Amino acid sequence: MSSQSFPDQVVGYSDRLRAYACKLGANSSFSDDLVQETVLRALLHADQFRLGTNLGAWLHTILRHCYFNERRSQRRLVVDDAVNDRAMAAEQMWSIELQDMEKLMAALPAAQREALTLVAVEGLSYDAAAFRAGCACGTMKSRVSRARSALAETVESSGTPHVDEEADDLDQAA
């Protein structure tokens, strides 16, 4: 048992939550908003947290739910792509490549993007990633495989990523 109060423990996870929010494809200010909403919800619903369980996993789950809720509500809005374009220096090729990778990741379905982020970026095992995402290990492996295939196909063809949304919909039912 930690000597810190529950609110201090929750706030102590802010950096890890922000990193996770950024990896989900959110921009910096949106990531900050997600973390703030997560901390707020955690503090408001502290009575639902069971002592002795993993606080980090609980907070990541709240953040994940906030992210998907926000994505669902954004589908109803029309977004001007010009607003999302970032200015960059021409001499920084790594910046261009990073921006290209962000676009490729953003083109993946949310479940595949999350799976690839958990396994490839955060370095979690398939079991740990599946636990965090709330799905079966086989489903996690399938999502990562399809995400990697879509990215590889896009890089090879230099076109639009092939996304198997029908297969991803099947994952959601699993």
Image (cartoon, rainbow, N blue to C red):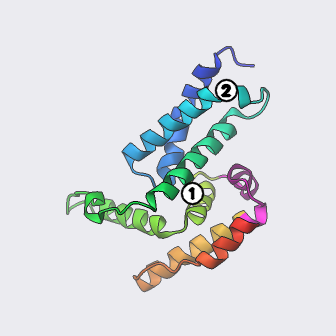
Viewer-nearest of labels 2 and 1? Answer: 2
Residue shown at 69% from the left, 49% from the top:
132
Q: Observer-nearest residue: 28 or 89?
A: 28
Is the magenta region chiefly helix, strand or loop?
Answer: helix
Distance in Å between CA atoms under marks 2 and 1: 28 Å
Say which quarter of the image contains residue 126: bottom right
Residue shown at 42% from the left, 65% from the top:
101
Question: Where 1 falls versus 26 (above or below)?
Answer: above
Figure quadrant of the N terminus: top right
* Residue 32: image location, x then y, percent: 43, 39
* Residue 135: image location, x then y, percent: 74, 58
Give the tally of numbered discs: 2
Residue shown at 51% from the left, 74% from the top:
151
Residue 117 tag number: 1
Residue 107 tag number: none
Question: Where 132 falls versus 52 (above or below)?
Answer: below
Answer whether residue 141 is visible to the viewer in this image.
Answer: no
Residue shown at 68% from the left, 38% from the top:
58
Q: Residue furthest bottom?
A: 157
Q: Observer-nearest residue: 131 or 79?
A: 79
Label 2 sits on a secondary structure element that is helix
Image-based side of 58 in relation to 11, left or right: right
Q: Which residues are magenta?
A: 124-139
Image-based side of 99 in relation to 90, left or right: right
Disc 2 marks which amino acid?
Ala
Density class for disc 1 (Cα within 10 Å; few <14, some 14-19, many ≥20) is many
Q: Residue furthest front?
A: 76
Which callout, 2 or 1, points at the residue further toward the start of the chain? 2
Say which quarter of the image contains residue 138: bottom right
